[in-house]
Image (cartoon, helix red, strand yellow):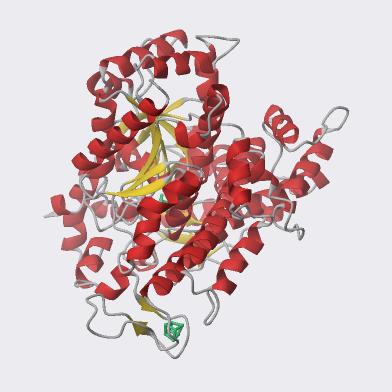
Amino acid sequence: MSLRFSIDEAVQKLLPVAEKDKIQTVWDRHKDQQPQCGFGKMGICCRICWKGPCRVDPFGKGAQRGICGADAHTIVARNLIRGIAAGAASHSDHGRHIALTMREVGKGNASAYTIKDEEKLKRIAQRLGIDWEGKSIRELTKEVADASLEDYSRQDSKIPCRWAELTMTQERAAKLKQWDVMPHNIDAAVAEIMSRTHVGCDADPVNILLGGVKGAVADYTGMYLSTELSDALFGTPAPTVTEANLGVIKEDAINIAVHGHNPLLSEVVCDAAAMLNDLAKQAGAPGGFNIVGVCCTGNEVMVRHGVPLATNYLSQEMPILTGALEAMVVDVQCIMPSLGAIAQCFHTQLITTMSTTKIPGATHVQFDKENAVESARKILELAVDAYQRRDPKRVNIPQVKEKAIVGFSAEAVIGALSQLDAHDPLQPLLDNIVNGNIQGICLFAGCNSTNTLQDRSFVELAKGLAAHNVLLLATGCGAGALAKHGLMTQEATLAYAGDGLKAVLTAIGQANGLNGPLPLVLHMGSCVDNTRAVSVAVAIAQKLGVDLDRLPLVASAPEAMSEKAVAIGTWAVALGLPTHLGTVPQVLGSQVVTEVLTEKIKDITGGYFIVETDPEEAVKKLFAVIQEKRAGLNL
Ligand code: NFS
Ligand code: SF4
């Protein structure tokens, strides 16, 4: 039965355990929700004011307008961009936390943190136009943080967010300004979406969508600074070998999962666990503390420190079902409220850490940057305590895991290429794109959804595109899926890459002393790290002297579901990328909105959405787009 839900063997092994113990999982609740509301699915239900809810009859027979007169196009567009606002708010709040922490580091506070990558800090300063000569690292840290925080506070709407303007091609920045979708202030862009979609404001669907694009570019801004400042604070990822899937949970260790998105606490938990490992041994766990990751917090510590990944979004309940998880520490975003109840069926401590994300059934250990080390220690103590209550009879760890080579930041990619050409590292990549060994590049991103078979589309798309010699990058839960299924290995390159791609990955791997190729899919990090892929793309575009929409570059979110994914997808389109969605967005109730997103926006940005739920068809469509782009460059 579980085959219908997920292709992940570890999930398939644990679902019968859930069934036996009568524990509801995400898939049971998905079933309980059937049939889901057709109005909601099409985006034509409006609850913006209390005269509603209003619904528009998609068949044209019943009401065609809400009580205020809003038609399907207005309603669909408003609903969509409110999602973008939520996504942008989430990513940029994450970025704000990082920037504020960095400012404290610059002031000499927040002693749990330091600048681990000073070179990166200097590169950031240079990009932001801050002179670093003669300044101490602390001074520079504060200046970089302050400059980044200005993107949240600037009131002059003529000056664009620096982290947006300075990270894309000049042509792209000019285009976004020309369409008035370049934000001057991240928070203002989010607020503007909420205010223009209030009852009785913007009713023009195209104008509303442009407001959404601006919110999405604000999302990009917050993500970009979040990634870059995190690198300065915690180190820039470099290739490292680790493992993925539930088999990384160890029977003889005190297992702690870090889940959510923000690395501020998980970084300190990792450090504390290494330092206090004896605590675990004294408690009778010979394996010590074993930290494993879930979702994007998992990706953050995976790409920076090689912490193994337990699982991705849709199967986040499974680590608890192994009966061997002492604590699940969560921060923000993509944390299922169901974890509270499931943890209570076991000895697992669910630990919330952020005042804005509390969950019934969890123990709250408030985290703030000033007491990070104390919070981490408290969490370890709670885990040790829970370990005493572990019931060995209920331990059920699926022995399923795959090796994964991860940590391909833009710097790591350029670093690997520089072994082929130290003076001009991008040239070998360009040469191989020109000669067709590499046909194009695809970035896999986004979530898992119950609307699809978990992980299947990621795996099939990756194998399909690799066979067509497309270079593959991945982030977020997409990266989690590909890691769990063994596609971040050298073996996968040998098994699935087309001849051209295999030759290039092998040449780079050999030049880097890997004794074989690079992995088939390059793991760039968490969802905020999608901007790492942008930075590589921008470098290629600048070198070729073209804008991003002319590159043979596509993005794919085969299981998109979160509002953050809506925001990311929209900025990918704003940057000019053809962007595939494997789940159907909730917009089909408006032909106008559907046409803008899948066709008309092409005339403005060069990017557009491709909706295709069948992975085989999606491979064909994405490869066709890559061919079209190549032809446009006379390749
Ligand atoms: Ni991205 Fe990462 Fe995962 Fe989706 Fe959620 S964890 S930020 S939103 S589900 S990929
Ligand atoms: Fe209905 Fe208009 Fe109110 Fe929406 S804003 S609920 S369409 S009356």
Q: Residue furthest left?
A: 1
Q: Residue at x 33, y 18 (%)?
A: 501
Which percent across, then down, holds residue 393? 24, 53
Which percent across, then down, holds residue 355? 59, 67
Where residue 561 sits, quadrant-wise, is bottom left
Q: Residue at x 45, y 47 (%)?
A: 603
Q: Residue at x 76, y 61 (%)?
A: 155
Comparing 157 with 205, the one in front is 205
Which percent across, then down, holds residue 625? 32, 35
Which percent across, then down, holds residue 48? 47, 80
Image vertical order of residue 126 relative to residue 29, above or below = above
Image vertical order of residue 394 relative to residue 553, above or below = below
**Image side of residue 187 versus residue 197, left or right:** right
Q: Residue at x 63, y 43 (%)?
A: 174
Where residue 487 sits, quadrant-wise, is top left
Where residue 566 sits, quadrant-wise, is bottom left
Quadrant (top left/top right/bottom left/bottom right) for the N terminus: bottom left
Image vertical order of residue 268 relative to residue 418, above or below = below
Quadrant (top left/top right/bottom left/bottom right) for the C terminus: top left
Asked if residue 405 can be seen in this view, the reply is yes
Comparing 99 with 375, the one in front is 99
Asked if residue 259 can be seen in this view, the reply is no
Comparing 528 with 15, the one in front is 528
**Image side of residue 471 versus residue 81, left or right:** left
